[in-house]
Amino acid sequence: MRRIVRILLVGDDGVGKSTLIMSLIKETFVPNIQHVISEVTIPPEVTPENVITHIVDSSARPEHREQLELEIKKSHVICIVYSVDDEHTFNRLASYWLPYIRGLGVPVVLVGNKIDLRGDHVANQSLEDEIIPIMNEFKEVETCVECSAKQPLNVSEVFYFAQKAVLHPTAPLYDSREHVLKPACIDALKRIFSLCDIDKDGVLDDNELNEFQRKCFSAPLQQQELEGVKEVVKEHEPSGVNEVGLTELGFLFLHTLFIQRGRLETTWTVLRKFGYGDDLSLREDFLFPPFEVQHDCSVELSPKGYQFFADIFQVFDKDKDGALKDNELASLFATTPGNPWTNSEFPHTTITNEAGAVTLQGWLAQWSMTTLLDYKTTLSYLAYLGFEGDTTTALKKTKPKKIDKRRNKVQRNVFLVYVFGAAGSGKTSLLRAFVNKPFTDGYTPTTRPFSLVNSVEIKGEEKYLVLQEVGSKYEAEIFQNRRKLEMCDLLCFVYDSNNADSFSHIVELRKRHDLDDFATVFVATKSDLDLVQQRHEVQPDVYCRSLGLAVPLCVSVKKQQTADLWNLLTGLSINPAIATPRLANASHCASRLKRYLTFTAVMGAVMGAAFLGYRLFQHQRGFGGITKRDIL
């Protein structure tokens, strides 16, 4: 909600604009004041809505036209003041002032001043009849207030209704001509109803109504009050209530009633509690609250986040078969812009049952992947789906990777592996096998990066592994974007062990880019076929050893011989140092140096002992000889 309200008073000379402002400030009538008084600022603590209020006077004289137009552009609400005892000033509302400010998108309050000069109830009634056509013609008119600056009477109400016109405007919610809620308002209220319908039975029972009341107004309703609300709805809209509670139709009726009775603040309070702005779209700060992430950190779901997504899965799994079908997913995403994964091959990017419905394991894995790759999507969908409280508590930032590297162990639960390889090397089949999809013969080129996810158990702990296939068209995009490259935990290079030219592709790829600082693994696919010698000066096993890495792991998707691979990829992601060529080589060299120094030390000790023994032998031999010679 806006925290500052700027109110501009306009109208013909002599209608009492300046006097109204002075009567508000002084709380009494002040005669003989200047033509235009200075801007007045009212502090928030003395206003009902707790907002800073600027009240601006104006002049209708031609010489002040430029200043008037400037103030009109700066205003949040315009009060057009007329004198109830001067029909000419009233007629100029529709003939001059309202057309003059039309199209600015600023709410208008009509203010009839000097009612002390009329004092005729019948005349007042006929004037009301004249105001209604004006309000019907000019939709920016929020309300009409009659007052007297001299008595003073209803002066504070003028500015209260002006504030309300800004803070709780009618125009976005209600069509005053048709006397119905506007479509955007209906959509917003339907979404709120759906979120408050915890058990998704299409009705708000007493507990759900009280939870709604607590969330929006911080106070539950007594049982007698609840029954009273339902009686009012039933009287005017019989279908709005059933034996369980309040239906969606009844919920919409209640808000129509609030608006028609001038209680717009009630409906606006509800809308704002559920994240809506003045244009009835969800606010940016509601969808994307501040959540700064360092470039070398990643984002995962917190226990709260996993619990929320598990709970919502259970609610929408109506047939309790442990999986979400298309219609159940459609119901789940009804309060959102739609399925966030329409541009991917979901649900085939995660674990599904035989019928292709996403399981709970697959659902949680999919959100783990989404959070890792694009945490802002997760943040917004937490809001769309009705996460209670601060949505950032459903996420957690991991420690910077440089800290993990120093410790030689990664303290994270979700890992990203980029999968590279020549066309036809079996990357897609390998990824599909990871999410238990059946093997299919034939080659289909990868037209865009393709990601999927599954959970892997390591030493009793569940980790999530995201595999992203990078086709040859997108290799340069990854390697030229260092930040994107640093997002991954492991580079997986795949080659076809049955194709003599397959290995050369990944060797050439590594030659063009400096990748020795990234954890790396090599995988030989199609091990069920004949192994052929690669057309490269160095064979894969020798090449890997030269990098200080393990020889390629041989797998066969067709024969379902891949089980060890997922544990290997996860294990290397957790302990990247042993698979990082520069570190592995350094470790290998250090190990060789250590072994050499140990060998040298041992040999030195042996040689030293032998030399000492030899010298001793020589000395003894020499000493004895001299003695004998001396004796002889």
Image (cartoon, helix red, strand yellow):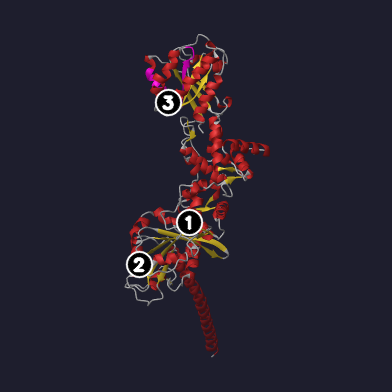
Task: Return the residue nearer the eye: 626 or 350.
Answer: 350
Q: Answer with left or right where residue 240 lies relative to residue 73.
A: right
In x, y percent, where is residue 253?
55, 37
Q: Which mark is in front, 2 or 3?
A: 3
* Tag 1–tag 2 contact (CB < 8 Å): no
Q: Distance between the residues labelled 1 and 2?
A: 28 Å
Q: Identity of the amino acid at label 3?
A: Glu
Span of residues in magenta: 65-85
**Does residue 588 show up?**
yes
Relative vertical location of residue 248 with respect to residue 51 in this rendering, above or below? below
Q: How far apart are marks 2 and 3 (CA)?
A: 66 Å
Callout 1 secondary element: helix
**Residue labelled with disc 2:** 443
Mark 1 or 2, nearer chain start: 1
Q: Residues within 10 Å of mark 1 (few under 14, many from 20)?
A: few
Q: Is residue 78 magenta?
A: yes
Task: Return the residue nearer the eye: 368 or 82.
Answer: 82
Callout 3 secondary element: helix
In x, y percent, where is residue 295?
45, 50
In x, y percent, where is residue 21?
51, 17
Relative vertical location of residue 260 with respect to residue 603 in this rendering, above or below? above
Q: Does the magenta stretch include residue 121?
A: no
**Residue labelled with disc 3:** 137
Q: How crowded is mark 2: few (under 14 residues within 10 Å), some or many (20 or more)?
A: few
**Residue 326 image label:** 1
Q: Distance between the residues labelled 1 and 3?
A: 47 Å
In x, y percent, where is residue 521?
43, 66
Residue at 56%, 32% (x, y): give it: 258
Mark 2 or 3, nearer chain start: 3
